[in-house]
Every structure is written in C-alpha cells, then in structure tokens.
Amino acid sequence: MKATTPVAQTRHSFSRRGVWNVQLFELNYDEREIQAAVEVIRSGWITMGEKTRAFEEAFGEFLGEDVLCTAVSSGTAALHMALLASGVGPGDEVIISALTFVADINVVRVVGASPIPVDCTSYEDWNISPQRIAAAITPRTKAVLVVHYAGYSCDMDAIDAAIHAGSDAREICLIEDAAHAPGATCGKRPCGTMGHMGCFSFFTNKNLSVGEGGMLATRSEELHEKGRYLRSHGMTSLTLDRHEGRSVSYDVVQPGLNYRIDEIRAALGLVQLDKLPEANRKRALLAERYRDLLEDAPGIDVPFRRYNLGEPSYHIFPILLSESVDRQAVMAGLKDCGIQSSIHYPPFQDFAAYRKAGLPATPIAHDISSRELTLPLFPTMTFEQVQFVCSTLRSLLA
C-alpha cells in the first residue's frame, strides 16, 4: 500500500507543541468530544448509566455478532476480571507474552497464580510463539494470555492448536490482551473475539482513547454475567436502577470489585469509536510511509514487514536498533530535535518486583527489549512529520 496524499492534521489545543515538535502521541479529539462530555455533565448523571450501556452495545456491534461487552475502568481491570472469571488462583499457572506491558504479569500475581512468560516467535514477528506455548503447558496451566503487539494479531489458529495439543483435553482459558488492537483482525476475525475473553484498553495513548477505561468482551453468556458482577461489587442492581425506581434494593451474589467506568468516559468512547476506522486507516498510511523512508536505513530493522495474518491497527511504530547502536544516545538526539520517543517494553526480569521471581529465560524478547525504539505515530500526524522523524533518525545513526 503506497500513500499518495498527506494525512490531514487537525491543529488543536490538545497538542503540547511548546514541548515537542513531534509528540509520541496526540489525542485525536475535537469539539465532538468536548460536546459529549458537556452533555453528560449537564444531564446531572455522571456515574455509570445509559451512556455506558450505549458504549457497550456499540462496541459489541463493532466487534461482531453475539459479542457481549462490559465497560470497565481500565484495561488492567479487564485483565484482572478475565482471570477471576476464569477461576485462576493460587497453584495455577498462566502463560503470558514475554514482550508486553507489566500489567499482564501483575494481574497474574495479584490473583495468586504463577506467571509463565513465553518468548516471541522471531525477530520478525514479536508476538508470542505458538510452538513455545505448547512447550510451556503443564498440568497446572489454567490460562493463556496473549498480546497482539503493536496492533498485529498473533497467529490465533496456531495458538489454539498449540493449546489443544498440550492440554490433554483440559479446557485452558484463552484470553486476548487486545489493548493495542481495537479494529485489528486475524483473517476476518476481530482481535479480542477469538479467545474466551478479550480485554481492551482505552488509555490516553490508545487507538480509542478516553483517558482511563477498558472493555471486557466475550461470546459466553456465563463469562459475561461473571464479568458484570465482578465489575460492581457482585450486586444485582446498579445505582442508576435504584435512582430511576427500577429497584429499591439489591442482593450480592458473589464477591466483586468496583471497576466501573463513568458516563463522561463512556460518552468520549462513543465518539472515539465512531472515529476509530478512519483513524486506523490514517495510521496505516503513516506506517507505510515510515517503512518506505526507513528502507535500508543503517542500524535499523522494522518488524512485521512480512505480516499477512490480517489487518493491523498500527497502535505504535516500533523499530529494532542494531546491537552497535547506543539507544539512549539516539533517544537523546531525537529529544534535542524535539522528537519524542519511547520503549515498548522493558523486560519483566529487570523490574525489582520480578528480578528474584525465577521467571524462565526469554532471550528473544529480552534482546528486543534492550534494542527496541518506538517512534511517534498518531492519526493526526502528517507525512512531513514522518519525514522529519526519519531524516533526523538517519542523521543520528550516520
């Protein structure tokens, strides 16, 4: 796919132009989000209510037929709820992607289970390896939690086959961390709908952004019901039901938490969901321009060049620096030119909480973590900004 026209950019007050020439990420917000928030405030009801229900229904329709959604306070909340709904607890093992945000390993430890990081497929495909998943399954394996890194789907057919091959007919729950992947597909199947549950994040820098928020998606009525109870203290009715006279009290049918989203963020989510397909299309054009401009650049490799599993959501644009390149010096050079960059992600084994946890070695992921660099990518970015980032990077590497 060759981009021939610039991506239109909206200049707005959500940018921090005085700090950066090119931010890592900019909000794709305009007056629609402002108006949506104002309408909720003027309604007099800001706790979870009708906007939340509308957001859940719209997101379920976006994901496909029979997908049931529960809007929650964060992507991490969705992950935690997915493990609890799966019955994961002390004595269980959960296989997780080795190259991901720390939330994935944290939620496993929080429920008392043992996290088992599994290495990437290759230096071309940074997603979890199906073959290594099969090798990591033990009689204690209760769930497999996979991440669609950067918005590129894992090979879900191969992962499903690996789980069935290693499980001895036991049901192992397959959970998708689709935080990077709203709108991405594996074949024609939307990411977040291929496992037992899918977990989405709507954090500020995500493709669909409400500040803090998330979604738990499933086609299982049983898991959906568990998720609804877990989100709100195990209660059988909500505050809105009592406020509007539909209920006078409530029962508590299981222990639960307060992982509710609020009406303002749900309203923002509805606007952002409407924008998501076009925003992802613009991300695709920008990612293609990046690849063209970095073709044969010294000291750089770009992953997922031969990706053919489906349509990515292009959440971030990661590159891999050569071993001889000083990443900190490159990041400092980019910063001096007003270009923000980041790292996705530091390895679990380097965090103080996990240095002595006895985690298995994941050499590919660990090496990628030591050399990965994330370049700016957001739907209101221009081709001129991509050109500036690439030319600056080339000059630094030269």
Image (tube, helix red, strand yellow):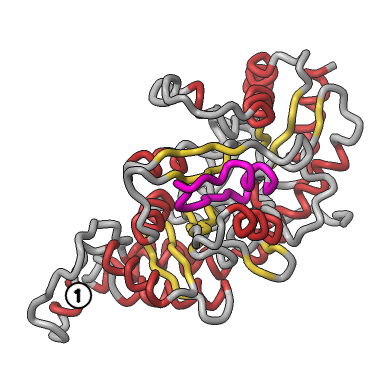
**206 above or below 331?**
below
Q: Residues within 10 Å of mark 1 (few under 14, many from 20)?
A: some
The x, y position of residue 114, in whole percent, is 41, 39
Element marked by disc 1: loop
Residue at 47% x, 36% y: name it: 102
Residue pushed farthest bottom? 246
Q: Quadrant of residue 232?
A: bottom left
Q: Which residue is mark 1?
A: 236
Whether 341 is among the magenta residues is no
The x, y position of residue 158, in whole percent, is 70, 56
Whether 138 is among the magenta residues is yes
Q: Which residues are magenta?
A: 130-149
**144 above or below 240?**
above
**357 above or below 325?**
below
Which amino acid type corresponds to the residue marked 1 in the rendered image? Thr
Image side of residue 265 versus residue 240, left or right: right
Image side of residue 48 versus residue 372, left or right: left
